[in-house]
Amino acid sequence: MLQADLVWHNAAQNRKNFSEKINRIKEQVDLIILPEMFSTGFTMHPQEISETMEGETVKWMQKTAAEKKSAIVGSVVISEGEKYYNRFLFVHPSGEINFYDKWHLFTLVGEDKMYESGREKLIVAYKGWKICPLVCYDLRFPVWARNVEDYDLLIYVANWPKIRIAAWDTLLKARAIENMCYTIGVNRVGIDANNYKYNGHSAAFDCLGEQVAETQESKEETVIFILDKNHISKIRNKLGFLNDRDYFVIE
């Protein structure tokens, strides 16, 4: 997971900065996770910086995934027609792309007025794992994340401010416990153009809420760690908590 500062509205510079960080990774990794809107910062001006699915940032993700032989993920401001999306991109080493459009738009700052909400949950199949990608504010809504698909890994990418970081810490751990899965949250650091401060707290938890990876407070950092699917399979089989989950329909 790459916890990093972001340059406001400067996709080329952000791509350059992330390339330098990724190129310093010498180990062979399976998955590289970047923050929400990693190419621009969390902006309410999509008309100024949006790209298409054929744009430079998507091409950069595909090129990086192929070169590193690793999937790379993060969210990007994408335009389609006259609509804008906060889109989580899961780019496979082959260049194949799965995407999820953020369902819960952050009404406090008017994200719902500038962006189109997604309509479908996504489960990605990758290297024998079932992965559920979600974005920032989605973390506050456990029903949407509920593990009715038996996924193994839940990923949140975020621009989650320091002032509310206690909620981030608590809810990441809660999502891991209640869904009996690994949960990873990757947040940014630094100060954006709106003077919001971000202190990171990127972390990973196992299905019992034990922390398996963390980052330094307010520091740019690349953290590499290993997840063991057998670990969660054994715990799920032993405890069987997901067998007692509720089933429901989201409208």
Image (cartoon, rainbow, N blue to C red):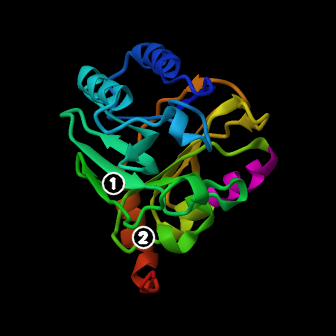
Task: Give the mark nearest the N terminus, 1 or 2.
Answer: 2
Give, as a single range, the part of the protein colored magenta: 163-172
Q: Nearer the viewer, mark 1 or mark 2?
A: 2
Count how many numbered circles sit on residues in the image. 2
Which residue occupies the extreme left position in the image? 94
Residue density around tag 1, few if under 14, some if 14–19, many if 20 or more, within 10 Å = few
Q: What number is the disc on residue 147? A: 2
Give me the residue at 44% from left, 85% from top. 244
Residue 24 figure quarter: top left
Amino acid type for the residue under numbered disc 1: Asn
Residue 36 vs residue 203, the one in the foreground? 36
Work out whether residue 69 or residue 111 is closer to the camera in this orientation and state it.
111
**Image coordinates for residue 69, horizontal then vertical, percent:** 25, 26
Q: CA distance from mark 1 to mark 2?
A: 18 Å
Q: Indicate the quadrant where residue 215 lies.
A: top right
Whether tag 1 and tag 2 are in contact, CB under 8 A, the answer is no
Which residue is depicted at the point 36% across and 48% down? Answer: 80
Give amino acid for label 2: Asn
Relative vertical location of residue 142 with respect to residue 157 in this rendering, above or below: below
Left or right of 211, for residue 119 = left
Label 1's element?
helix
> Is residue 67 on the magenta stretch?
no
Q: Which residue is mark 1?
A: 230
Seen as rendered, the residue at the extreme front is 82
Tell whether position 165 is magenta.
yes
Instruction: Report x, y in % for residue 180.
Output: 47, 66
User: For this view, does 28 lie left or right of residue 204?
Assistant: left
Query: Which SS type dominates the magenta stretch?
Result: helix
